[in-house]
Image (spheres, coloured by chain):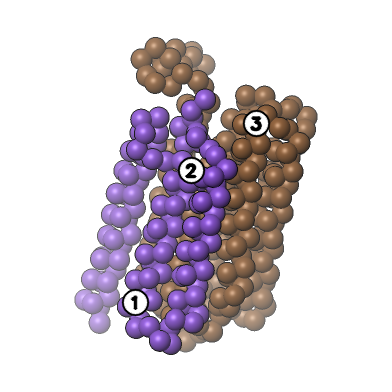
Amino acid sequence: MTTETATIGVVSHGEFEHPDPISNQVFGFWIYILSDLVLFSTIFAAFAVVGHHYAGGPTGKDLFNLPYTLGETLFLLFSSATYGLAMLAMEGNRRNLVLVWLLVTFLFGLGFITMEVSEFYHLIRAGDGPSRSAFLSAFFTLVGTHGAHVSTGLLWMAVMMVQVVTKDLTPAVQSRLIRLSIFWHFLDIIWVGVFTVVYLMGVI
Amino acid sequence: MERAGAGKASLKAYAAGFFYSIALTEIAFWMVMHGERTLPRWVVVGGIFLAAVVQILIHLHYFLHLDRSSTVRWNVLALVFTVLIITIFIGGTLWIMSNLHYRMM
């Protein structure tokens, strides 16, 4: 396994346009992101099929509060922008600024997750949990999968803040920060699909 | 250094992407919250899906820095292939399930 990786590394240096290992790592991570996109597309497809099967239970119109969803959306959008500022600080090799923007991004992301967990909590408390109808099963699966991704991203971000402090902005740490940025922006893109298909279409 | 999928970042690009995204989000929510009473349904549905597609392209361009340059060609090619797969998945699922629904009525 080690020799194989080394061989591929040598070949890619010679024949392909991937001069630095970070580009290779980022490309590999991009392939993972695309496979995650396929995962989300299957959940979107499931929601599209059963999204109107309410089983006599509440509909999107009864459950969704659009100003609340708009607030969640803005949290995620602001966090995407502040992560961009962290990347700019990283390129300028300004370690403390990177930490500040990572922390701001983390707090915006935490705000998003807190709002989502609170929404889930109130739905389940009111008896409108995932077992209520096919629509709610699909809703909790889709929005919950996105929320699980955001939570993982937050955990990753916390680890990166520790690494920036303890290891400084080494090439390895920079590579991880770049990949986290792709992950984070990707989650914002998925959320655009979620608020359009689930919340806005659910209320119309 | 130019890096595939994460190169050419600039403050201007992030600011532009951020403001376009805010604008498109506000337009989409406004159309559903306030425009629904005056606008016909197909305009609202078409409008929010158009706003979503444009916003996704804005994110890809300004936040993920995907464009037609050669440094990110493989990233874009892989994305295009994935979009094809997704179209087959979602389109095929809806087609099959609606057909099944029709036959079982």
Q: Are marks 3 and 1 in contact (CB under 8 Å)?
A: no
Among the chains pictured, the one given brown colouring is: A
Res B43 label: 1
The colour chain B appears in is: purple
Residue under label 2: B64
Number of residues whose C-alpha sits closer than 10 Å to that of mark 2, classed few (under 14), some (14–19) or many (20 or more): many
- Chain ID of residue with mark 3: A
Q: CA distance from mark 1 to mark 2?
A: 30 Å
Mark 3 or mark 1: which is in front? Answer: 3
- Chain ID of residue with mark 2: B
Q: Amino acid at mark 3?
A: Gly
Query: Could you say where residue A64 lies in the image, as x and y percent from the top left?
Result: 55, 77
Q: Give a yes or no on whether discs 1 and 2 share a subunit.
A: yes
Q: Amino acid at mark 2?
A: Leu
Seen in the picture, residue A159 relative to A80 is either above or below; the reply is above
Query: Could you say where residue B66 lies in the image, as x and y percent from the top left?
Result: 42, 41
Position of A120 with respect to A56 (left or right) is right
